[in-house]
Amino acid sequence: MVKTVGTGSEKGKIIGGNKKNTEYSVINLIQYTPSILGVQLKKRIRMAFSASSSMAAQLHTLPNSHHHRLLLSSPPLSSAAFISRSNGFRLSLPLRPSNPKNRTISTSSSVVRASANSMVALIFDCDGVILESEDLHRQAYNDAFAFFNVRCPSSSLDGPLDWDIEFYDVLQNQIGGGKPKMRWYFKEHGWPTSTIFETPPENDTDRSKLIDVIQDWKTERYQEIIKSGSVQPRPGVLRLMDEAKAAGKKLAVCSAATKSSVVLTLESLIGLDRFHGLDCFLAGDDVKEKKPDPSIYLAAAKKLGVSADDCLVVEDSVIGLKAATKAGMPCVITYTTSTSTQDFTDAIATYPDLSSVRLSDLEALLQNVVAAG
């Protein structure tokens, strides 16, 4: 099976064996390195795939690039750094000479330093990771805008403010937290009239009150949606949590959302036993700065009593990825329909969901990426 990637001078290919469901199928190779590093990379790939006698690889260099990225599809179980049991993941591998005292997982500016130790703590984001919730939040916001008859001066709508799917996908992937979203929007489009304030609020106190009232009502509405029983956790999340606890790993959830909203979500979707079994739970109320600021992950590491590089974070968006890497924590991505096109270069792996991802896969991935560095 041959897949060609890139165009013009950036075109390259990698050839891989393919046999039933037990063989490896390499989908992408992009941004390869200068030829002097090509030899080193080939050796690493041969070592990584040494467990499979059926995998043959032929690499062609791509000029003027600093790192490469691989996307693997339908691989079997393995301890190799490139391998997961997911439907597909992307791995960024450093190509600098190995230094055992200073190992890295990424060649980007936000380099994550990793220890050679096994993973001690597994940290989940909530919205987008444990459940696909962003459209539920959008519905709740629009219900709140309608309830308080929120109307912005620049809006072309005849009725209350209404965030459509396309706009909210962009907004929620650029600004973390509900209150910061509204504050940004009102600054950009004009502070609104509403049943809370008949005229647009002009001072910081009234503006904060407006946002607080809307957010509180929105949170209650969101909780009603969650309690309806129509929402299910994303595939593989509960199993992965149970595996982590059974293996003695510390388990945490860190969400930028309002605490009351996250508590209800976790109690409803992961169950009371798992929720109360968490070693750490932090929400947006617990830190001053929202993601992509790393505060929430730094606070989690402190509460867990572990170093940042002993943690592995599971996120769904580039905002969360930035927060994790800025905190010095390696991060894997399980993307959603609204985040699938984002740039996850700094993630050590990218999955469509966690349905086939086991704890052993994550540990092997982390250890082998460190070893490759």
Image (tube, rainbow, N blue to C red):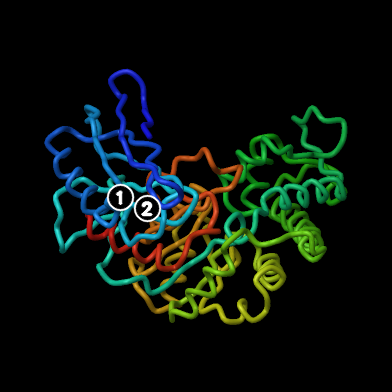
The C terminus is located in which quarter?
bottom left
Disc ID at residue 307: none
Q: Disc 2 residue type?
A: Ile
How many callouts does the rendering have? 2
Counting from the top left corner in percent of width and height, residue 56 is at 27, 42
Counting from the top left corner in percent of width and height, residue 18 is at 38, 42
Towards the viewer: 57 or 249: 57
Counting from the top left corner in percent of width and height, residue 275 is at 62, 77
Say whether marks 2 and 1 touch (CB < 8 Å): yes
Residue displayed at 57% across by 81% down = 277
Q: Which residue ends up furthest to the top in the rendered image?
A: 8
Q: Secondary structure at mark 2?
A: loop
Counting from the top left corner in percent of width and height, residue 290 is at 53, 57
The N terminus is located in which quarter?
top left
Towards the viewer: 68 or 5: 5
> Hey, which quadrant is residue 283 in on the image?
bottom right
Q: Which residue ends up furthest to the front in the rendered image?
A: 20
Disc ID at residue 348: 2
| Front tag of 2 and 1 | 2
Left or right, 252 with respect to 217, comes to left
Residue bearing mark 1: 106
> Hey, which quadrant is residue 270 in on the image?
bottom right
Residue displayed at 57% across by 44% down = 173
Q: Between disc 2 and disc 1, whose residue precedes?
A: 1
Q: Disc 1 residue type?
A: Ser
Q: What's the CA distance linking mark 2 and mark 1?
A: 7 Å
Towards the viewer: 162 or 121: 121
Q: Decide: few, some or many residues near mark 2? Use Cα within 10 Å; few <14, some 14-19, many ≥20.
A: many
